[in-house]
Image (cartoon, rainbow, N blue to C red):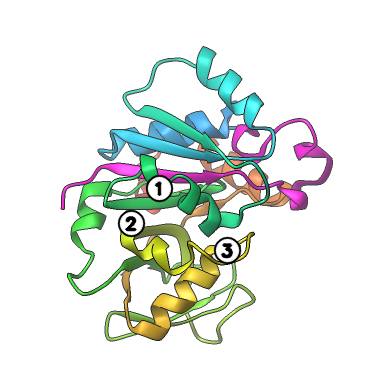
């Protein structure tokens, strides 16, 4: 498996951003003096990603407009737009025709540089998915339990003594069949739960931190980090 494709889930309404997201989607929020999408694509390109598929929804036309005029990137970008609130898993189901048989998934508010091909290669033969989790302290509470290389529990509200989902995962496209006929919106948490029950959600545990721009405060945290990103220590902390 040598897929270098990443699906970015960028269709949410970003309600936690309040007025900031009324006219500008989360993935275009200014971060480090640039739209977050450009920061994300640059980071993915540096670590070997060659193709990104954007799953769009809320204010999709603003993202499409930006893609038409954005500076050139080494990463080729394709898009699909959900017709209604599909949820994170539902968006992937709707985009299935655009996806490789094995692909990486990144939440549209997550910044973490990782080697796409290397992460895909870590997906065990018997698993339908793999979650990248970290031991590092972040603004997001610990929400994952891992034992013997498998995710055994996932709860967005927190898992005591657990690790933290970085917002990065790998999926086999066949995993989407588990939620293909479920009512929409269908969340990735639902798909992860089904994979956990089957013992088919593996985990890769790292020590690097990631950034989540889901709230104005967290955007500022990433802004502060990017202002210091020229230092060697900062670069290492945001790379896996």
Give me the C-alpha separation between circle 2 and circle 3.
Answer: 16 Å
Say the numbered circle drawn on residue 173.
Answer: 2
Q: Tell me what residue is drawn at x 29 percent, y 46 percent.
A: 100
**Label 3 sits on residue:** 187
**Residue 176, percent from left and from top:** 41, 61
Question: Upstream in the sequence, badge 1 or badge 2?
Answer: 1
Does 71 sit left or right of 104 as displayed?
right
Q: Tell me what residue is drawn at x 60 percent, y 39 percent.
A: 223
Q: Is residue 228 visible?
A: no
Magenta span has 184?
no
Question: Upstream in the sequence, badge 2 or badge 3?
Answer: 2
Q: Secondary structure at mark 1?
A: helix
Q: Nearer the viewer, residue 75 or 205?
A: 75
Give me the C-alpha separation between circle 1 and circle 3.
Answer: 15 Å
Mark 2 or 3: in front is 2
**Label 1 sits on residue:** 96
Q: Secondary structure at mark 3?
A: loop
For label 3, the crowd category at 10 Å Cα-Cα, with few meaning under 14, some 14 to 19 and many 20 or more, is some
Question: Upstream in the sequence, badge 1 or badge 3?
Answer: 1
Q: Secondary structure at mark 2?
A: helix
Q: Nearer the viewer, residue 137 or 66?
A: 66
Q: Is residue 27 visible?
A: yes
Q: Tell me what residue is drawn at x 57 percent, y 24 percent.
A: 64
In the image, residue 216 sits, relative to residue 23, either above or below, namely: below
For label 1, the crowd category at 10 Å Cα-Cα, with few meaning under 14, some 14 to 19 and many 20 or more, is some
Magenta span has 3?
yes
**Residue 87, percent from left and from top:** 61, 56
Q: Which residues are magenta?
A: 1-29
Tags 1 and 2 touching, CB below 8 Å = yes
């Amino acid at each position: 498996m040598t897929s270098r494709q990443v699906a970015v889930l960028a269709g949410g309404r970003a309600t936690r951003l309040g007025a900031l997201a009324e006219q500008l989607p989360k993935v275009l929020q200014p971060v480090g003096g640039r739209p977050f999408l450009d920061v994300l694509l640059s980071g993915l390109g540096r670590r070997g990603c060659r193709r990104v598929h954007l799953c769009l929804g809320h204010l999709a036309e603003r993202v499409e407009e930006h893609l038409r005029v954005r500076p050139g990137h080494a990463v080729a970008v394709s898009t699909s737009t959900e017709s209604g609130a599909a949820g994170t898993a539902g968006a992937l189901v709707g985009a299935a025709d655009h996806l490789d048989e094995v692909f990486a998934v990144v939440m549209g508010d997550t910044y973490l540089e990782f080697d796409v091909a290397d992460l895909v290669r870590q997906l065990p033969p018997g698993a339908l998915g793999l979650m990248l989790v970290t031991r590092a302290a972040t603004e997001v509470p610990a929400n994952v339990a891992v034992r013997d290389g498998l995710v055994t529990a996932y709860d967005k509200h927190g898992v005591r003594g657990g690790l933290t989902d970085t917002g990065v995962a790998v999926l086999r496209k066949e995993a989407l069949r588990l939620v293909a006929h479920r009512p929409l919106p269908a969340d990735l948490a639902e798909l992860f739960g089904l994979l956990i029950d089957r013992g088919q959600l593996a985990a890769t545990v790292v020590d690097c931190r990631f950034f989540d721009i889901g709230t104005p405060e967290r955007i500022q945290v990433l802004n502060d980090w990017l202002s210091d990103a020229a230092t060697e220590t900062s670069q290492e902390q945001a790379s896996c």
